[in-house]
Amino acid sequence: MLPDLLPLSQQVGAALVAKGATICAVESCTGGLLLSTLTDCAGSSAYVLGGLVTYSNEAKMNFLDVREGTLIAQGAVSGATAGEMAQGALALFDSDYALSVTGIAGPGGGTAEKPVGLTYIGLAGRAELLRVERRVWGGDRIQNKLSSVEAALQMLLQAVED
């Protein structure tokens, strides 16, 4: 069963508005779904500054300043890359918070070390990497993308409410 993400997105929006905070997002495996979910709420222009889909390594390096050495040593799907993506987005959009998502949605592309469903979600706040979470989802491509968006929204909500 697919989750209904609108109530969670509305909660996130209300928390951001209450705090007077802004958000941006950069995505790889979710392909814009996170930003789409954030902007499904009326009035989201008050707190959503923008975002990018950086699917290729070149886009991660060119737009977000992800280091080539990080991509070579750890890969696009890694905690280090998710962290650098979030920090790059924070600088690019000058937002209060930045979310990043990178992973292997499936059905192919996985390995023994990095299975299908492996996802890293990064959250940065005002020049500081707050955290990176590693998740492994067990669904199909769409379910994995939706699960990643839900986890990113939960991570952001927790940070804003703290």
Image: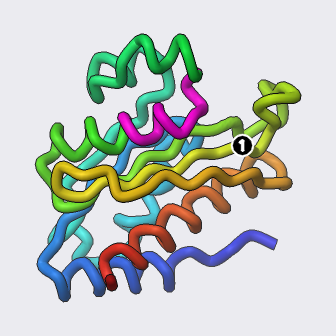
Task: Identify whether 9 is placed above or below 152.
Answer: below
Q: Is residue 42 left or right of residue 123?
A: left
User: What is the chief secondary structure element of the magenta stretch?
Assistant: helix
Residue 21 counted in the magenta span = no
Q: Is residue 62 left or right of residue 12?
A: left
In the rendered image, which quarter contains the C terminus? bottom left
Q: Are there few (<14), some (14-19), or many (20+) residues within 10 Å of tag 1?
A: many
- Frontmost residue, 122 versus 62: 122
Residue located at (49% from left, 52% from top): 132
Q: Residue 26 location in percent, x, y?
A: 38, 42
Residue nearer the viewer, 55 or 117: 117
The residue to which callout 1 is attached is 118
Residue 114, horizontal then vertical, whole percent: 76, 32
Question: At numbered mark 1, what does the secondary structure look like: helix, strand or loop?
Answer: strand
In the image, which residues are magenta?
75-84
Residue 115 location (% of width, % of height):
81, 36
Identify the residue at horizontal 41%, vertical 41% (top origin). Answer: 83
Type of amino acid under label 1: Leu
Image: 73 above or below 26:
above
> Looking at the picture, how far across and down is residue 31, in whole percent?
52, 41
Q: Residue 3 sits in which quadrant?
A: bottom right
Residue at image location 57% in from the left, 22% down from the top: 74
